């Protein structure tokens, strides 16, 4: 018979706005799929988490990264560039989730190999709807690479 193994999807949320982080956590908590959300607040923490450095030596390699662009210490563009230049990280899909709708940011993100660019809606209900649609697409429809 077929396996009934439940895959847990690990998501890294890189978001410095506590309100947006909380909304994303709430939206993903009610998920149809099993997921584990890890949250860091700046670009330096994101890179440490991904490289399992400092306080993140026991971190898990995420299956999906939700990345804000406007971050303290190291901005999201720098984080995206580092992820996509690192052979051990570059296969992880990165969804840019940011307030910027500047065409220069959109083009730069895609040139740095972002997998998707989404502008955060101002409306709270719409924000939750957007996070749920990210979940539906990236966690239900798309086949994500798994670490060996």
Image (spheres, helix red, strand yellow):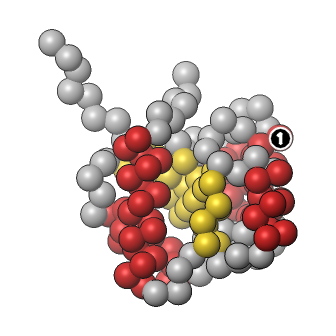
Q: Of all residues shown, which one is farthest toward the left? A: 1
Q: Is residue 40 left or right of residue 42?
A: left
Figure quadrant of residue 125: bottom left
Furthest-front residue in this view: 103
Q: Residue at x 20, y 27 (%)?
A: 4
List the residue tagged with mark 1: 85
- Residue 59 in picture, x, y percent from top left: 56, 47
Residue 98 is situated, as x and y percent measured from the top left of the image, at: 64, 72
Q: Is residue 19 left or right of residue 95?
A: left
Name the foreground residue: 51 vs 10. 10
If the image is split into quadrants, where does the N terminus sit? top left
Drawn side of residue 98 relative to residue 138, left or right: right
Tell me if residue 54 can be seen.
Answer: no
Q: Quadrant of the C terminus?
A: top right
Residue sitting at x 71%, y 51%: 114
Q: Is the residue 106 above or below the residue 82 in the image?
A: below
Mark 1 falls on what kind of element?
A: helix
Number of on-image labels: 1
Q: Nearer the viewer, residue 40 or 54?
A: 40
Report crowding for label 1: few under 14, some 14 to 19, many 20 or more residues within 10 A (C-alpha). Answer: few
Residue 72: x and y, percent?
76, 76
When the figure is inspected, residue 98 is found, relative to residue 147, above or below; the finding is: below
Question: Would you place residue 58 above or below residue 12 in this image?
Answer: above
Q: Position of residue 18 (x, y in %)?
A: 53, 81
Quick one: which residue is furthest to the top in this view? 1
Front residue of 91 and 141: 141
**Residue pictured at 52% horizontal, 42% vertical:** 63
Residue 89 appears in view = yes
**In front here: 106 or 18?**
106
């Amino acid at each position: 018979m077929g396996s009934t193994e439940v895959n847990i999807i690990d998501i890294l949320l890189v978001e410095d706005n506590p309100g947006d982080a909380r909304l994303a956590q709430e939206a993903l908590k009610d998920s149809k799929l099993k997921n584990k959300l890890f949250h860091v607040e700046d670009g330096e923490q994101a890179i440490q988490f991904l490289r399992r450095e400092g306080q993140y030596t026991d971190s898990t390699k995420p299956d999906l990264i939700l990345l804000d662009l406007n971050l303290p210490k190291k901005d999201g563009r720098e984080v995206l560039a580092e992820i996509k230049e690192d052979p051990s990280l570059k296969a992880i899909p990165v969804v840019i989730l940011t307030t910027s709708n500047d065409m220069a940011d959109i083009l730069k993100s895609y040139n740095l190999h972002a997998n998707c660019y989404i502008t955060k809606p101002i409306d709270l209900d719409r924000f939750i709807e957007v996070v749920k649609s990210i979940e539906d697409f990236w966690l239900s429809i798309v086949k994500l690479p798994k670490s060996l």
